[in-house]
Image (spheres, grey):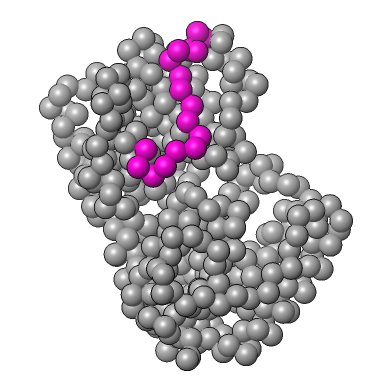
Amino acid sequence: MQIDILLLEQITRKQPFGGVARYIRRIIGALHDKFGKRFAVDSQLKHLPSDLRHIHLPRLRFRGMHHLGLGQTILKLEDSLLNRSLARIKPGLVFSPFCDLVVTGAPQVFTVYDFALERYPDLFIKRLLPKQLARMQACYRTASALLCISESTRRDLLHFYPFVDPTRVHVTHLGVDDAFFASEPTESDKAGKYVLFVGGRDPRRNFQRFFEAFASSGLSVDYQLRVVTPRHAKSANWSKSEIEFIRAHDLETRVKLETSISEDRLRQLYHGASFFVYPSEYEGFGLPILEAMASRTIVLCSNASSLPEVAGDAAIYFDPFDVSSIGQALQKANGLSQAERGEFVERGLVRARAFSWSKCAAKTISILQEVAE
């Protein structure tokens, strides 16, 4: 049977959780519903439709290859074997929801998330960075279409890579799962007031400035700080400097870190929070903002990159590079009247409902069909 669209991705081998995995799973479901057996995937992502058509293409990567100096050789050999296999399968179009392997013999569409490599090169392995950037550029040069998850990402793409034809670049905003709208806090979560942070705590996510603002704001007297960091993140456990900071500010009983939580638990934490704070310096989209809004939680976030595009008029903004600005936003949120809190909650619900996976999928399918034709 002819494959009209083949979804080819490897990123979820390394990142099986989080926003990217959620996006890929949603798009796979929509493409399966639309094309049935004419759609196939090469993906190790779990919890996919049981009757989904799978294609297993060759993979040659192994742990430690970069240390042996074989990384580029392995990649070239894998590309060659991949394209030989694709030549036999002859898909009408290859959709790669992450910029990685470039295929030949079929039009290819990539999803572009952000430009952290370009903006924060010091956070990545220095000797691998040139190869990673070259591989991304190859994707941008060969793509029949590029799907950016925000207008902010689209602007960055055209800024960093002006050779890209703007007519090939489309914005497909992410969506929020319906389950977040129906979530409820547990009885124990209702018992105490807390401020919620969700995400990695690397420098780009700006946790340290937020931590300093929380400690100096005086809110720790009345609020606990709940921190949720994915277990696969490098910053999952408290660092030595964070432990020292907690002790120096007497926050041992006022800060709680959770690293291995279920989707149900995440929704409960969103819903039970007094406010959700997203202090990131740079994001391609900022999906946790919508998840918090859908959970009827007041959002405080940075006025940087894509975040105002996502949050609109439903958030309290601050300068992510200014600890005092973050602290003032915390004080503002704490001082809201009941009526003002209700207004923010309602605006947040309206904003969250404006971003749906059905809209994301419909636009994606439209672009893929246009390219295929």
Residue 257 counted in the magenta span? yes
Q: Nearer the viewer, residue 123 or 3?
A: 3
Q: Quadrant of the C terminus?
A: bottom left
Q: Is residue 103 visible?
A: yes
Q: Position of residue 155 (x, y in %)?
A: 47, 58
Q: Which residue is drawn at the image coordinates 54% and 83% (left, top)?
A: 107
- Please tell me whether residue 366 is drawn above or below residue 356 in the rendered image: below
Q: Which residue is drawn at the image coordinates 79% and 53% (left, top)?
A: 64
Q: In screen coordinates, is 210 left or right of 240?
A: left
Within the image, what quadrant is residue 312 found in? top left
- Total numbered labels: 0
Q: Is residue 204 visible?
A: no
Within the image, what quadrant is residue 271 found in? top left
Q: Position of residue 212 (x, y in %)?
A: 50, 19
Q: Please give the range of residues in magenta.
A: 249-265
Q: Position of residue 215 (x, y in %)?
A: 46, 15
Q: Which residue is drawn at the image coordinates 74% and 68% (left, top)?
A: 60
Q: Residue furthest right?
A: 68
Q: Residue furthest front?
A: 50
Q: Residue furthest left?
A: 339
Q: Which residue is drawn at the image coordinates 56% and 77% (left, top)?
A: 55
Q: Position of residue 95 (x, y in %)?
A: 50, 74
- Please tell me whether residue 285 is drawn above or below residue 42 in the rendered image: above
Q: In screen coordinates, is 263 left or right of 236?
A: left
Residue 93 counted in the magenta span? no
